Image (cartoon, rainbow, N blue to C red):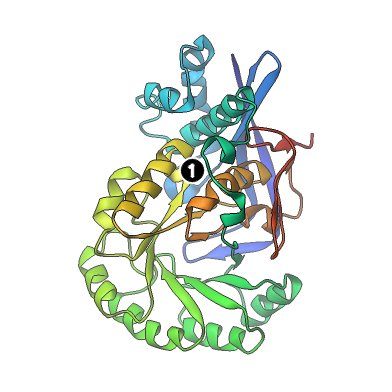
Amino acid sequence: MKLSFSVRDLPLKHTFTIAHQSRDVQDTIIVKLEDGNFFGLGETTTNPFYGMTAENIGNRLEAAKELVEKGEWKNPEELWEMGSAIFADNPFAQCALDMAAWDIFTKKKGMKLYEYLGLDPKNIPLTNFTIGIDTIEKMVAKMKEVDWPLYKIKLGTDHDLDIIRELRKHTNSRFRIDANCAWTAEQAIRNSEELAKLNVEFMEQPLGKDDLEGMKEVYQYSKLPVIADESCIVESDVKKCHGLFHGINVKLVKAGGITPGLRMIHEAKSLGMKTMVGCMTESSVGITAIAHIAPLLDYVDMDGAMLLSKDIAKGMEITPEQITFPEGNGIGAVLLD
C-alpha cells in the first residue's frame, strides 16, 4: 500500500463570505492510496477558523505513512482506530485518509460505497445551494444564476431579516438559514417568528457553540427547528446536542471522516434527532463521498463543487431532479489532472 497526497487550489465562482471569514480560493488536500490495480481518493479542505492548514495536515499524513503502508489494517474502521492517536489533533487529515480507505476498500469488494453500506440512492434528499453573505443585489444575482428549489442563506449581519425578506421577493424556493454563531438567544427567537412566515425550513447554528443556556431557550421557544453545526464537531458532541437542537449537521472533515460520521448519524437517529451532512467547499472527490452516505439523511448540503469555477475532479452529477453517480466502484471520483 502506498500513501501520497497533494495540495490543490479550488477557485470559487464568487467570493464566499460567512459570518467569520471570506475567501476566493479554497485550498484542498487530496490523498491517494494505491495497492496494485486499485486506488482510493480522499479529500480535506484547509480551514483557518479551525487552525487546519496545508502544512499541519500534510505533517499528520506524513506521520501516518508507516502505519498505512504496512497494510496491517483489514478495513477503514480498523485503520481509523489504529490512527486515532496520530490524528488526535487533526481530524481534517484523518478525514482525507479515511475517505481514501473507504474508496479503495469498496473498490476491492467490487461495490459502490452506498451498495456496501446497504443504502438506496433513490432516498437521497435534495441538496441546498448556498448563497454567501453579500450585498442583497449580488445575493439576488447569485440566485438567478443558479435557479434551485432549495437555498441555504448565510446570515450574520445587522440586517439579516431584510436580506431574507428581499430574497423572498425573487423566488418561491424554500430557504434554510445559517447564522454561523452570529446571534444571541433573544435575536434567534425573535428572528424565528419572522423567518417562519418566509418559508424558511430551519435555522442552523444561530448561537455560539458554547452558549448552552442560550440554546435551551432557543430550543424551547423557536418557531423553527434548529440544527447544530459548530456545536457538533465530534462524536461526543451528539449527546450534548440532544435537547438543545432538533438535529445535527455532520461535517466529515471536522469529524475525522466517513467512519465517525456514520456513527454520529446513527447515534443522532437513535436519539430522535434529524440528521444532515454538510460540506466545506470540497471538490467532486469529497462531495461524491457525501452523496454515497446521503440516503441516511434528512437533509444534505453537498453543493461544494457547484460553487467552484473549476473543479479538479469528476464525480457524481447533481440536478434538482436526480443524482448521477460515477460508473466505477468505491466512491468513484477521479482526478482530472
Q: Which residue is outermost to the left?
A: 213
x then y, percent, for residue 49? 45, 51
230 horizontally vs 170: left or right: left
Q: How many labels does the image show?
A: 1
Is residue 159 among the parts visible in the rendering?
Answer: no
Residue situated in front as seen by the camera: 163 or 111: 111
Q: What residue lies at 44% left-to-right and 36% top-to-bottom?
A: 259
132 horizontally vs 328: left or right: left
Residue situated in front as seen by the camera: 175 or 106: 106
Reply above or below: 10 against 158.
above
x then y, percent, for residue 195? 45, 84
Which amino acid, mark 1? Answer: Val
Q: Quadrant of residue 256?
A: top left
Element marked by disc 1: helix
**Residue at numbered disc 1:** 253
Reply above or below: 334 against 324.
above
Quadrant for the N terminus, please. top right
Q: What residue lies at 64% left-to-right and 76% top-to-bottom?
A: 139
Reply above or below: 42 against 242.
above
Is residue 165 among the parts visible in the rendering?
Answer: yes
x then y, percent, for residue 12? 69, 56
Q: Which residue is outermost to the right?
A: 337
x then y, percent, for residue 21? 51, 60
Q: What residue lies at 67% left-to-right and 38% top-to-bottom?
A: 8
Badge 1 crowding class, 10 Å Cα cut-off, few under 14, some 14 to 19, many 20 or more, is many
Q: What residue lies at 70% left-to-right and 46% top-to-bottom?
A: 325
Q: Quadrant of residue 330?
A: top right
Quadrant for the C terminus, please. top right
